Amino acid sequence: MSPLLQFESVGKSFLGVEVLKAVSFDVGPGRVVGLVGENGAGKSTLMNLLGGNLRPDAGSMRFQGASYAPRHPRDARLAGIGFVHQELNLFPDLDLAENLFLADFPTRGPLIRRWELHGRAAALLQRVGLGLPPTTPVGRLSTGERQLLEIARALSFDAQLIILDEPTTSLSVPERERLFALVRQLRAEGRSLIYISHTLGEVLALADDVVVLRDGTVVGQGTAREFDPVRLVSLMVGRELKQLFPKPQSNGQADGTPWLEVRGLGQPGVVQDISFTLRRGEVLGISGLMGSGRTELARILFGLDPHATGTVTLAGKPLTGPPKERIRHGLALLTESRRDDGLCLEASVADNVALVTLGRHARSPLRLLSIAGLREALAKVRAAVRLQPRLTDQQPVQTLSGGNQQKVVLAKWLLAEPRVLLLDEPTRGIDVGAKAEIYQLIHELADRGAGVLVISSELEELTGLCDRLLVLNRGRITGEFSRDAFDSSAILRAALPT
Amino acid sequence: MATMTSGATGPRRVPSLIAAALRSEYLVLFLCALLFAGLAPFTPGLASTDNFLNLLGNLAPLLVVALGQTLVLIVGGIDLSVTSTIALTSVVGALVMNRDTGWLAGSPLAAPVAVVAMLGLGGLIGAGNGLAVTKLHMPPFMVTLTAMMFLSGFAIWLTQSKNVGNLPAAFTVLGSRPALALPIAASSAGLVHLLLERSLFGRWLRAVGFNARTAHVSGVPVDAVIIAAYIASGLLAAAASVLYTGRLETGSPVLGQRILLDVIGATVIGGTSLFGGKGRVLWTLFGVLFLTLLDNALNLLGLSHFTIMMVKGGVILLAALLDTARTRWLAA
């Protein structure tokens, strides 16, 4: 059988830098192809070529046996290629049906045929297992449901090839399972999928074939059976990554001093009766499904959201007021979403890193800043977070890879020398190499006496990283595990709604 | 110098000199030079010393208002009330100090008290705008648009639509003598530049403009920064009013009514973003110079007010087009 899609020596450069070099691989009909690689390996560029957002400088593509050279995203749709994006492309204020048929509303003359619109939308929603009325506004959907909607959109024009870009990063376990079942169903219908993910276990479980990209070249391809996670990682990073998680070691600073004490914290409908103590030098994990209240807990602790009952103290002093008061007491928060409230994307590395601690370099009158002081602090912290030396201080952070962006957020907080760090999804959407570096950094912080609270939807990350683990379920703590008693199935049981 | 990388690709290759000019911060200054060189041969008196002084006299107050607008645009807002602030502070100042019926008529303190009252009122208006935007969570466009209507009406009501003349000479020299007006404008520009580029406030202002949520999480007093920006805008509008009123030697309730487009146009032509975060005093200076020069040349050419408006509208549109085009050409 001839392949559905073929990349033939595709190359692309930006300002003289080769981002893709002679990339060739096929996607067979009815196959799921897992595409993996570190951030910056060229996956996004390749998908942009496929989607008609960019044009290749060299080589060509063939789709369904014919030459395929899209000049516009519309061409991809007409050819039958659908994209489910990492940053979802939906209109939150429009309803499901409108989002599905935005590009080709069924019309009579200038008017939209509403009955036909809703009928067709309902049928499509049924196919992806989204049992909601077509008039629901998209703004009310969870991330997982939005993803299903995007898949429904691809099916609306009978896409033969569907690209899933990091589809599971923000999904809960049941949502994930539902997505996987849908992927298998689409494959059974004879459609092909390209599945891009950093979660290698998923790729291996789901994909028929695997393609590994590194620095713009294909460094490995074959059927999924030929790969295992260790081999994938070493292909992706081009070296043996000996250990993802730093070895747990006896921590000289962990003297049991309570740093962050939370007592009876509650907010109706969000969290209830939360009590725990985070000690000096401890890495405490919080596990829980989406909507379990884990992000909300971090926001309450940091003063971003209100709470009705309970107290929070840091090193014995009560924490109240807005974030700036809590920062002064030694609290730091790395937020769930770098783009939304972690970084000023258009501002430079230097300005982002300095933001929290600017006041220390200001002198009266006029609170003018000491440029030398700022530069010195930046140089020091750049080394501490291992920010790649080729990145300049004046580069806007939006041009950085996810891993480097996260390092910038961490650098910003490290300069404040916090006693307690709240890290909400510290490695979301970043590549394996950067992940390992951030894990290392977290341990260094704990070694120097900080208390670190890590919130993550990746259980493997929490069990690898933490000394102790709390499980949140519908706003309550339903389990506590110490490192020697980590048991994935028990933790999952505590997290699942009963 | 412009060293385009050999691998530079794109549908069109921009010649390197033009590319360098387009990429430069001084683009608008180059455009000013082009405008001047292009119009000077046809425009009688454009290059004369008298006209230069006139040009600078026009530039000084406009620059002062535009400085405030720059601060507010950087923080992600907009201040449409500046022209009414100019009008209201103008008549209030005049009512305090005019030599016939003024509150302090004849007193040697009349002029300084009037100036303080004008600045105080400007700051107060700014504070009101800032509080409405931050504490009541109202859109800056609506807040300052309604403030513009209210203050403008209030200024006319206060004077029953009459001008208030006969102001003390100690006051009018501030605006009418270039040797005083220019240093006032220049020192305002210098101060705002220093604040923006070197101070804590400037960094906070940009951070809030880029992403207020990130700024809040990072411990920046977001509301205070926004309010400060509006206060500064009100203060600077009042300072501009001192210059305009002095130049006119009259407190006028319709002072500055026609310059709103110039203020926002000049700031945006200079390169300050309407979406927050980006903006510099130097850019605004160039934008103000550009519009003042254009206005001046068209006046000298003897065009009617309406023609001048049409040409100015067209030129501002062209400048906006050029800005979009350069972003696209220089991308990738």
Image (spheres, grey):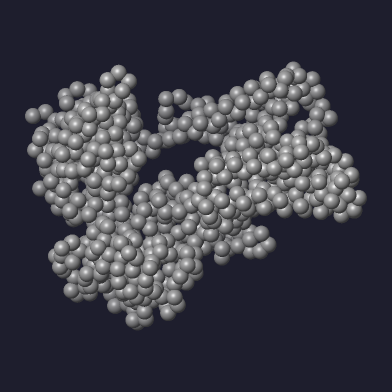
Could you say where residue B52 lies in the image, as x and y percent from the top left?
Answer: 79, 31
Residue found 21% across the figure and 62% down from its top: A460
Kindly indicate the quadrant of the structure image that contains residue A20. Answer: top left
Image quadrant holding the C terminus of chain A, namely bottom left
Given residues B294 and B162, the one toward you in this image is B162
- Looking at the image, residue B206 sits to the left or right of residue A224; the answer is right
Position of the N terminus of chain A by quadrant: top left
Question: Which of A454/B317 is in front?
Answer: B317
In the picture provided, is A124 more to the left or to the right than B15?
left
Residue A24 in view in this figure: no
Q: From the viewer's perspective, tell me whether residue B43 is left or right of residue A296.
A: right
The answer to whether A234 is drawn above or below residue A454 in the figure is above
Residue B42 rendering spot, x and y as whole percentages: 74, 17
Residue at x 79% of width, y 36% of height = B162
Residue appearing at x 77%, y 32% in the figure: B55
Q: Position of residue A16 (x, y in %)?
A: 40, 35
Image location (x, y in percent) of residue A310: 37, 73
Q: Quadrant of residue B272?
A: top right
> Residue drawn at (32%, 45%), measured in percent from left and top?
A139
Relative to residue A324, is residue B13 depicted above or below? above
Residue B172 makes an appearance in the image: yes
Q: Quadrant of residue B264?
A: top right
Report the number of discs: 0
